[in-house]
Image (cartoon, grey):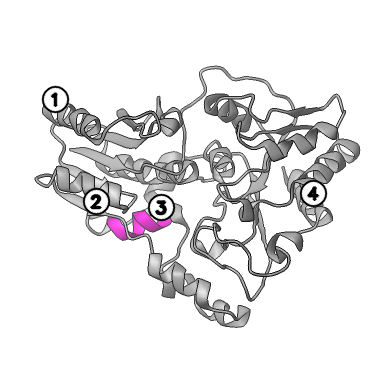
Amino acid sequence: MHILLVRFSSMGDVVLQTATVNWLRSLLGKKARFTFLTSSEFTSLLNGHPEIDHVIGFDRKKGEKWSDLVKKIDLLDENDPIDLILDLHATLRSFRLKLSFWNIPALTVDKRRWERFFLTKIRSSALKKLFSHKIFGLEPQTERIIKDFQGLFGDLRGKRRAVEFRKGPHEELTSLPALKEKLDHGNNIILAPSASFEPKRWPVDRFVLLAENILQKTPFNVIVLAGPEDHFCEAFNQINHPRFKNLQGKTSLKESMEYLAQAKICIGNDSGMNHIAEAYGVPCLTLFGPTDPLFGFAPHGSSSRFISKDLNCKPCSTTGKKACHRDRLYCMEEISVDEVFSIFVKMMEVK
């Protein structure tokens, strides 16, 4: 059986969908073939993945046309006929792809859009708590797709089967390609201060203070990882310490993966860096602002933790893109440096 899995973006979501790949491999065995279609900027996340046979990249930013993508899939289908398209994105692009290959059976993920939207309209913390994950169907993202599809594939064990198959150090369901070289980065603590949208970022000055606390009160190194466009990370340049590195804009995605895989812990916002770390079995401390762990994107590793303030106004949007209507971003500003540092210290004691 040859399955084409489709998830164009974003970085964290692509990583989370490896849980689905691992589950399918555990269920269908070595004879099944899996091709993963994603945006070209994320192919390095999946190239060399032990359970993915082929990765197809689509690069709209560099002018690649839709017809070019269709040709790629046509060639793939000609050489190894596709039996099923598994649409893990459920967008207009993925719908267009299914129309282009209407003769191939397809399954589409339920993204719980209406359930998440409804949660953004509830303005009572107490009322939110009355609605359990079971009512909304908002289980952790790593488990949700397996649960939705396991009946169609005749699987009664679902998540348990996938966990046993992975046998990760923290029973993580996600995975990424093994590193070719085991780099020794020492006792590194990774700070990931970026996020897809500005409201999802914990204030950078607090990340700076957190870095200084870690350097002054612990023996660990601190490394900042962020993209070339994250110029706000220049605030870290005020730190002058031999155990500190600001690598914002200085590493490729593959190099960032190597640093994350060797880290002691990753502290960051609700973003892809934390998901990458967890896929390598590295604990995360995730800071939630306008989004909410109820959406199913909280860290899933048994050693990971998250902080999310209980406010009537959150979640205010399903993606965290919406600008705050209040005079301050309370959901982020109420997360103190002392609180984050205290939880970090407890996590390191456990390790």
Residue, x 35% and y 43% (percent of image)? 7
Badge 2 is on which residue? Answer: 95
The amino acid pointed to by label 2 is Phe
From the viewer's perspective, is the residue at label 4 or at label 1 nearer? 4
291 magenta-colored: no
Q: Secondary structure at mark 1?
A: helix
Magenta part, dominant SS: helix
- The extreme top residue here reads 181
From the viewer's perspective, is the residue at label 3 or at label 2 nearer? 2
From the viewer's perspective, is the residue at label 3 or at label 1 nearer? 1
- Boundaries of the magenta span: 143-149
Q: Give the mark nearer the N terminus: 4 vs 1.
A: 1
Left or right of 36: which side holds 295?
right
Separation (CA) of disc 4 from disc 1: 53 Å
Left or right of 256: which side holds 26?
left
Badge 3 is on which residue? Answer: 160
Q: Give the mark nearer the N terminus: 2 vs 1.
A: 1
Badge 4 is on which residue? Answer: 206
Where is 298 relative to 25, above or below?
below
Q: Quadrant of the C terminus?
A: top right
Q: Quadrant of residue 69?
A: top left
